[in-house]
Image (tube, rainbow, N blue to C red):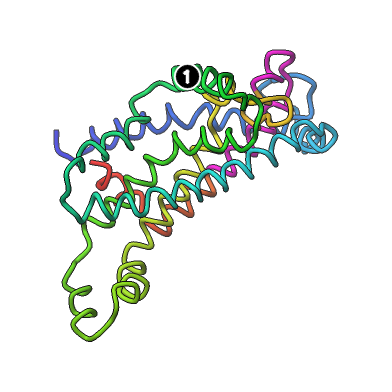
Amino acid sequence: MRKNGPLALAFHAIVMLFVLAPLAVVVLVAFTPDETLTLPTHGLSVRWFRAILAYPDFIAAFVNSLKLAVLSATLSLAIALPAGLAIGRARFPGRDLLNALMLSPLVIPGLVLGIAFLRFFAVIGATGSFAWLVVAHMVIVTPFVLRLVLAATTGLERSVEHAAQSLGASAWTTFRRVTLPLILPGITGGWLLAFINSFDELTMSIFVTSPQTVTLPVRMYMYATESIDPMMASVSTLVIAVTAGAMLLLDRIYGLNRILIGNH
């Protein structure tokens, strides 16, 4: 079968349809004027989007998720950037061990991480703290930032840095004026990918959130256990919109093809 032959294209189309069909159904149901989750709908309405505004728990959870995603992505970048530069450009004892340690959360199930964090926070008396929730999210999103920083750093041409230094630029000036602009797409892409993963995180967050720090995915899960109505679909549609917008921005800045290549 040729790489881009008719059978390959048909297979890819079927896979994309399988992945996107449930999302399309959720979006369509979000605009129903009916009281139940039904398709086809009897017209279109934004009734259930207005209902979100009358449910303050969803608004508070959205604010929590937004703050949590911004803080965890930013702090993860502060850790992953120097680590990525060191791992990608230097040779030192323990380099491979450091790389494996920082990427290890990718292979640990969220359920295991959630239970581990729950026990750890209980021991140190930090249960329900928003600051420690940020730390937990940092652990799970730092590998995503590190992978993109490593991809950008590994492909960096060192000759331009050497040229800047030969012209009298200091190490800090070379980094600020030469290195940083060259790896900026990887840095920005890593931050956005960390933001997306933190904003959508559910499995681990269930174990470490408190009534004051409930995130939007956790709030949606709690609401779905009590009742299922079209408001769940409208909230899900907003989450889909935020995630899709971040992915489009990520593609424009860094390029999803380059991300996939870098991750391999």
Relative depth, front residue between 132 and 243 = 132
In the image, is residue 193 above or below residue 126?
A: below
**Residue 222, x across and y down, in percent:** 68, 19
Residue at far front of view: 124
Crowd tier of the residue under label 1, counting other residues whose Cα lies within 10 Å: few below 14, some 14–19, many 20 or above: some
SS state under label 1: helix
The prevailing secondary structure element of the residues shown in magenta is helix
- Residue at the spot of label 1: 116
Q: Is residue 184 left or right of residue 9?
A: right
Residue drawn at (75%, 28%) of the image: 42
Magenta range: 221-243
Q: Residue at x 59, y 44 (%)?
A: 242
**Residue 216 against residue 39 in the figure, above or below:** below
Q: Residue at x 47, y 32 (%)?
A: 20
User: Horizontal placement of 41 versus 84: left or right?
Assistant: right
Q: Nearer the viewer, residue 102 or 61?
A: 102
Looking at the rendered image, the quarter that the C terminus falls into is top left
Q: Nearer the viewer, residue 95 or 141?
A: 95
Three-letter amino acid code of the residue under disc 1 = Ala
Residue 183 inside the magenta-drawn segment: no
Measuring from the top left, give residue 87's x and y in whole percent. 24, 49
- The extreme right residue here reads 54
Q: Quadrant of residue 64?
A: top right
Which quarter of the picture shows residue 219?
A: top right
Residue in view at x 23 percent, y 36 percent: 97
Residue 174 percent across, percent down from the top left: 30, 74
Residue 12 percent across, percent down from the top left: 31, 34
Number of on-image labels: 1
- Position of residue 178 relative to residue 244, above or below, is below
